[in-house]
Image (cartoon, rainbow, N blue to C red):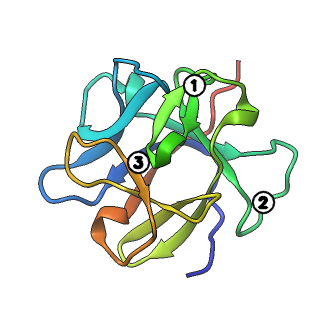
């Protein structure tokens, strides 16, 4: 499928796994590469479940296929990183954050790393892995736009 542009802003990222709504969630306990990112049920405290999506280069013009970065909306210095093909959130310089593109698929979008690997939610509570893209619902996500990126 062809890449699609995404409006920069604050989002909830819903995973398409069986059962009640699951959201991309930063865990509260850091390990070697930062805090593992999982899917979990909706949590009334949005701190770990609302994400900023922005162009990897803030000066770039929007275009399909442009790379984006994803970071915690309430901790804008904490972005997604991908060591060992697993998803973590960590407070490292923006230049070290993983870059992603989005492709439209049936029922949502597929989120692809700059290596062409797809984010995959195996089951609720499992750490998000990056795998070769397949037509599977565990690799389909819904982006719920919540508003513009807060500026201070």
The span from disc 3 to disc 1 (Cα, nearest Å) is 16 Å
Labels 3, 1: front one: 1
Reply above or below: 118 against 95: below
* Residue ID for mark 2: 62
* 32, 18: nearer the viewer: 32
Of mark 3 and mark 2, the one earlier in the sequence is 3
Q: Is residue 31 left or right of residue 111?
A: left
* Residue ID for mark 3: 13
* 109, 8: nearer the viewer: 109
* Residue ID for mark 1: 78
Q: Is residue 82 left or right of residue 26?
A: right
Residue 148 found in image quarter: top right
Reply above or below: 144 against 52: below
Of mark 1 and mark 2, the one earlier in the sequence is 2
The span from disc 3 to disc 2 (Cα, nearest Å) is 20 Å
Which quarter of the image is occupied by the C terminus? top right
Image x and y of residue 106, in percent? 38, 78
* 141, 37: nearer the viewer: 37
The secondary structure type at the circle numbered 1 is loop
Residue at 61%, 79% (x, y): give it. Answer: 2
Residue 28 found in image quarter: top left
Residue at 44%, 44% (x, y): give it. Answer: 86
Of mark 3 and mark 1, the one earlier in the sequence is 3
Residue at 71%, 69% (x, y): give it. Answer: 64
């Amino acid at each position: 499928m062809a890449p699609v542009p995404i409006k920069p802003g604050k989002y909830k990222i819903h995973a398409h796994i069986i059962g009640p709504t699951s959201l991309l969630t930063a865990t509260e306990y850091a390990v070697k590469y930062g805090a593992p990112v999982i899917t979990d049920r909706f949590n009334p405290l949005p701190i770990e479940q609302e994400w900023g999506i922005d162009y990897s280069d803030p000066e770039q013009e929007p275009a399909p296929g442009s790379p984006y970065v994803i970071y915690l909306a309430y901790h804008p210095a904490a972005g997604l990183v991908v060591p060992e093909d697993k998803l973590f959130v960590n407070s490292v310089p923006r230049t070290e954050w993983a870059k992603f593109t989005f492709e439209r698929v049936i029922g949502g979008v597929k989120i692809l790393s700059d290596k062409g690997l797809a984010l995959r939610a195996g089951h609720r509570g499992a750490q998000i892995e990056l795998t070769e893209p397949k037509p599977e619902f565990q690799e389909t996500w819904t982006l719920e736009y919540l508003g513009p990126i807060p500026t201070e």
